[in-house]
Image (spheres, rainbow, N blue to C red):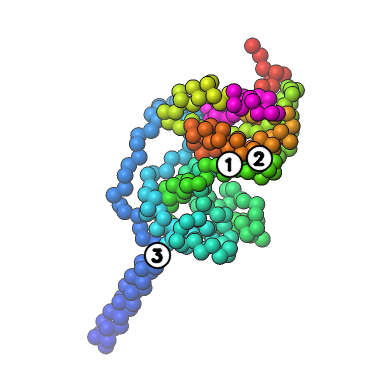
Amino acid sequence: MKARERVLWLAVILLLVGVVIAGRRVAPSAAPANRPRAQPGLRLSMAALHQQGGVPLGWQMTLPPGDAAAGRQAFVDFGCPSCHRIAGESFSTGSGDQQGPELSGMGSHHPSAYFAEAILSPDAVLIDGPGYVGADGHSTMPAYPEMTVGQLSDIVAYLTSLKAGSAQSCHATGSSMLSVPVNMSTVDLGNRPPPQPGEARVFFAQTYDVLPGQLAAFETWFARQGRQQFLAVDGLLSIETFVDLSRPGTAVTSIFGFRDEAALRNFMGDPAAADLWNQFDAFVGPHGHYAADRPLVYRAPSLSAR
């Protein structure tokens, strides 16, 4: 009887070991243990950290260094190509069956922390488009509880590397006034003081951080070329740039004031504007754009004093 029990237990153990091995064969490979360490960042006292609201001024989430090649493989292992297409990649079928956003060139549009959040917490930002949000109001993006921090960093490094051919996609690329979509937003001031009246009626905002070591060159380019070229555009009345270090995220915002919406659309559809924007964007990191009927940043005289 004991011999039979031993044989039975041995069979059970072998079966369990086989299940574990089979599971490891289909699971994405783990990230290597010997990962590069990040460069030391900002140093400050605990008292200063608390005085600044619990995070350093201008703080952004920083991921551990990742490997783009390993991230590409992890992207495939986790089944991401079944929903996301990337132009030029062999795993992209181009069949049109994908439900998620196309990721071609996305490294030029989003910072790495945004990619990390989209993977870890898909409901944090819901993209309003066909197939992106389910009937329950949640993102159709699946969760990946088994993903390691190393795999996350690698995938983010891969997505951040997808920049080829995307530099011009933010701005003008054609000759028609409507060749570039400009999504105008009506700003609800709510209980906020209104801006001072001025000639500009439409505003285009770009929020960014200047690339490391490029500030002096950026300022020189703007003083010698950029300012004159922008102000030579018909209907572009002003450029105001503000720096806000009081909140997390990108700190520099440039606001372009236009005479009206037609002037903005004409400029964004002008092929000559593409080169000007490319010169501007060469000095700045990933950024967003916002077109609105009110300035996005302005001084409120009723609550100001000198």
Looking at marks 2 and 1 on the same chain, the residue that comes earlier in the sequence is marked by 1
Q: What amino acid is labelled 3 in the image?
A: Ala
Residue found farthest to the left: 3
Judged from the image, the secondary structure of the residue bearing numbered disc 3 is loop
Q: Nearer the viewer, mark 3 or mark 1?
A: 1
Magenta-colored stretch includes residue 64? no
> Mark 2 to mark 1: distance in Å?
11 Å
Judged from the image, the secondary structure of the residue bearing numbered disc 2 is loop
Q: What amino acid is labelled 2 in the image?
A: Gly
Q: Report the quarter where the N terminus lies.
A: bottom left
Between 92 and 189, the one lying in front of the other is: 92
> Can you tell which mark lies on residue 170?
1
Task: Tell me how many marks there are.
Answer: 3
> Mark 3 to mark 1: distance in Å?
37 Å
Q: What amino acid is labelled 1 in the image?
A: Cys
Judged from the image, the secondary structure of the residue bearing numbered disc 1 is loop
Residue found farthest to the bottom: 1
Local packing at callout 1 (Cα closer than 10 Å; few below 14, some 14-19, many 20+) is some
Local packing at callout 3 (Cα closer than 10 Å; few below 14, some 14-19, many 20+) is few
Q: Which residue is mark 2?
A: 269
Examine the image and state in which quarter residue 233 appears. Answer: top right
Looking at marks 3 and 1 on the same chain, the residue that comes earlier in the sequence is marked by 3
**Is 200 above or below relative to 171?**
above
Q: Report the quarter where the C terminus lies.
A: top right
**Is 20 above or below relative to 243?**
below
Looking at marks 2 and 3 on the same chain, the residue that comes earlier in the sequence is marked by 3
Q: Position of residue 175 (x, y in %)?
A: 65, 42
Between 118 and 183, the one lying in front of the other is: 183
> Can you tell which mark lies on residue 27?
3
Relative to 235, 70 lies left or right: left
**Image point (55%, 35%), residue name:** 275
